[in-house]
Structure formats: C-alpha cells, structure tokens
Amino acid sequence: MALAIQQSQEYEGNEFWRWSVWISGTAEELGSVDHVLYILDPTFHNPVRRISDRTTNFRLDTSGWGTFTIHANIVYRDGHETP
C-alpha cells in the first residue's frame, strides 16, 4: 500500500466547514515519515501547517469558510520529500 491522503468534513451551515486531513498507509510506511506540510488556501492565517504527530497519522483538524483544495508535502526521515 502506498501512502494516501484521507479526509473528512462536516458542514456546519452558512458555508462553514469543520474538516480533517491525514495520511494513511502501513505502519512501516508511516514510520518512515518525519512530518507532513499541509498547504491551505492563502486566506488562512498560517496557511502552511507542519504536523509531526505520527500517533494521529499526521492529522490536521481545523475549520473554515467555503471549500478549497489542500496540498500536502510528505517529508521523510531520510530527508527526501514528495509533493
């Protein structure tokens, strides 16, 4: 299995959403990851979020108005990175 980005969302009304995004994969694959950089819409305060918590599968929980595409860069322990 290759690493994959997963997400969930909940519509709160009035164009407001609560959502989460995380990485799924085998324990070995996840163990090779150092951190994930999530790139949010530039209208967010701090639009680049670094998540290093492997116990949550590098999960980001947040909320905002409207919808947009989230990009993620996976940074591995050996230093290489995949966009």
Image (spheres, rainbow, N blue to C red):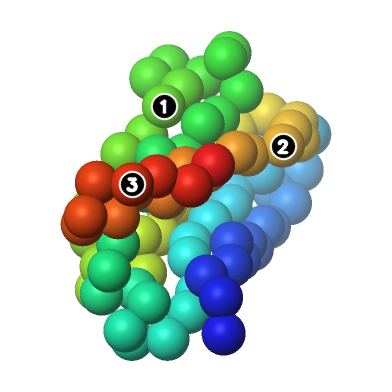
Can residue 34 be seen here? The reply is no
Residue marked by disc 1: 48
Q: Give the quadrant of the N terminus.
A: bottom right
Mark identifier at residue 80: 3
Q: Nearer the viewer, residue 68 or 36?
A: 36
Residue 82 seen by the camera: yes
Q: Kindly identify the residue that appears in the image at 51 percent across and 31 percent down.
A: 39
> Residue 31: which numbered mark, if any?
none
Task: Give whichever of 20, 81 is nearer the camera.
Answer: 81
Nearer-N-terminus badge (3/2) = 2
Would residue 9 be found to the left or right of residue 21 on screen? right
For the point 54% across and 42% down, the residue is 83
Q: Residue at x 68, y 57 (%)?
A: 10
Residue 35 point in image, percent of width and height: 28, 51
Residue 52 locus on image (x, y percent): 23, 53
Residue that carries the numbered disc 2 in the rendered image: 69
Dot 2, crowdedness within 10 Å: few (<14), some or many (≥20)?
few
Numbered disc in front, either 1 or 3: 3
Q: Mark 1 falls on what kind of element?
A: strand
**Quarter-of-image position of residue 5:** bottom right
Give residue 20's position: percent from left, percent from top.
Answer: 53, 56
